[in-house]
Image (cartoon, rainbow, N blue to C red):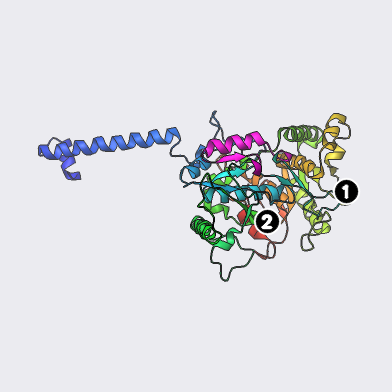
Amino acid sequence: MNYSDLVRAIRGFPVSPSRLRLAYIYSVAAILVLLLFVSLHESGRLPSISRLTTSAGRHTDLSLPDAPFVSWPLVRLCQNTKWTPGIVFACNNNSGGIGNIRNFVLTCLRYAIAAGATGFVLPQIETRSEKDLAHLFGGRQPFSYFFDTVHFTRNLQEACPAITVYDDIESIPHLVDRRAEPLQPKGLGLRRGCDERDLNRHTDMFRTKFDEMVEQSAQEFHLSSVTARHPRLFQPVWGVQWEWPVAKDGPAFTNTFGGLLRLREDILELGKETIAVMTKIAEGGQFAGAHLRTESDALSFWPTFEKQTAEFMKTLSEKKLVSIYIATGNATEAAKFQLQAERRGSRVWTKDKLLQQQPTLQQRLQALTWDQQALVDLIVLLNCNFFLGVSPSSFSMTIAAKRHLAMEDGNGGIVYTQPWPVNNQGDARSRLVGNYSHYWDDWLFMYDALWP
């Protein structure tokens, strides 16, 4: 029955009974399809980026360090994954500050899911020397050194029930050789002509190449086929934290995946209390946050103290913010920054100075290690009114990218679909001072591999 027949029937003109029955069947079918679509959408089976909301209908602010974990993008990924019993991943090759370690763990887990791993060893945190910040391998601490173990384990296993999280390598059943097999994911694809720093542009083929590697190595070394009774343990090499092209997973997954790694509760609470103190003494309750990256392990081609300070002061004048919270591990240059700022009529606080009159909070802060104290800075800087950092510091980059998740569109809605703008201007909430001329030499490729 065509459109003309339908019009004729509506207007009372004669139409054959067979055509009327056909029209009736098509109408019923269309209604059923529409009802099914609505039902799936309401039940969450057809999620969209607009569903990043709270139960009260308000947008979830994913920029907050304690934002609720939005699980449906991870659920969808795991539902579409083919799992291989016996494949287990460990992610202990992380090192550096929270920016590096956080991105390593998330990227390593993303590879584990892509590989169909049914086992995941709770990562240990590689510490660094507080006397020599360039010494990145000072011994390992448990996952809880930085992160909320219960939050991570519960949400990962609820979203991906096929994955078992093991407390340590010794907990993996039937594993004979406790030494992890090193995995270099970019080495599994053909990368002729690529810059060695390039991202893994072959992630869509990673599973195929990984399965082939597992089978070929089993034959070469006379190993049993991998099963739950004959597991194999893989550990990605150091450096994979900057190679997964996060945009490939889409904005919904990219902007929520990092929510698995929530900072541990006592550090979150200390950070919130530090924010309250800063807000109380800041002029008008408004304050800027700055990450001055000039510690002893800063690289020579990064912006100098003079460059960072000059650009920070210029932007703060434009923003009309006179109260500044500064995060830095260099006390000498923090004092120099404070002197320059005060000459311009600004007041500057570090976390130590801020808590001098708060003995209980100060005691809790001093009980933390250098890198754990940096987590307090991270929390405060995520909540400041405007943030200034340096590119390509992974600490600054992580803060700016996560703060970007609270950006509003012209209608007051939250924008989750636009990534952080990689340029010298930043966005309305943050700016990173740096050189944006060369994609490789200025390490801009890191932005394409960063989980907010």
> In this view of the protein, can residue 92 be seen by the observer?
yes
Q: Is residue 428 within the magenta segment? A: no
Residue lying at the far bottom of the rendered structure: 193
Q: Is residue 156 within the magenta segment? A: yes
On screen, 112 above or below 12? below
Residue type, numbered disc 1? Ala
Q: Residues within 10 Å of mark 1 (few under 14, many from 20)?
A: few
21 left or right of 255?
left
- Foreground residue, 371 or 306? 371
Indicate the quadrant where residue 370 lies: top right
Indicate the quadrant where residue 245 lies: bottom right
Say which element carries label 2: loop
* Mark in the foreground, 2 or 1: 2
Distance CA(mark 2)–CA(mark 1): 30 Å
Residue type, numbered disc 2? Trp
Q: Position of residue 308 (x, y in %)?
A: 79, 55
Q: Position of residue 139 (x, y in %)?
A: 77, 48
Say which element carries label 1: helix
Locate the N terminus and report the quarter of the image it occupies: top left
Disc number placed over residue 238 in the picture, else none: 2
Q: Residues within 10 Å of mark 2 (few under 14, many from 20)?
A: some
> Earlier along the polypeptide chain: callout 2 or callout 1?
2
Residue at 35% of width from left, 35% of height from top?
A: 36
364 left or right of 10?
right
Q: Position of residue 357 (x, y in %)?
A: 88, 32
Residue on which disc 1 sits = 331
Magenta range is: 144-170
> In this view of the protein, can residue 430 be seen by the observer?
no
Indicate the quadrant where residue 168 lies: top right
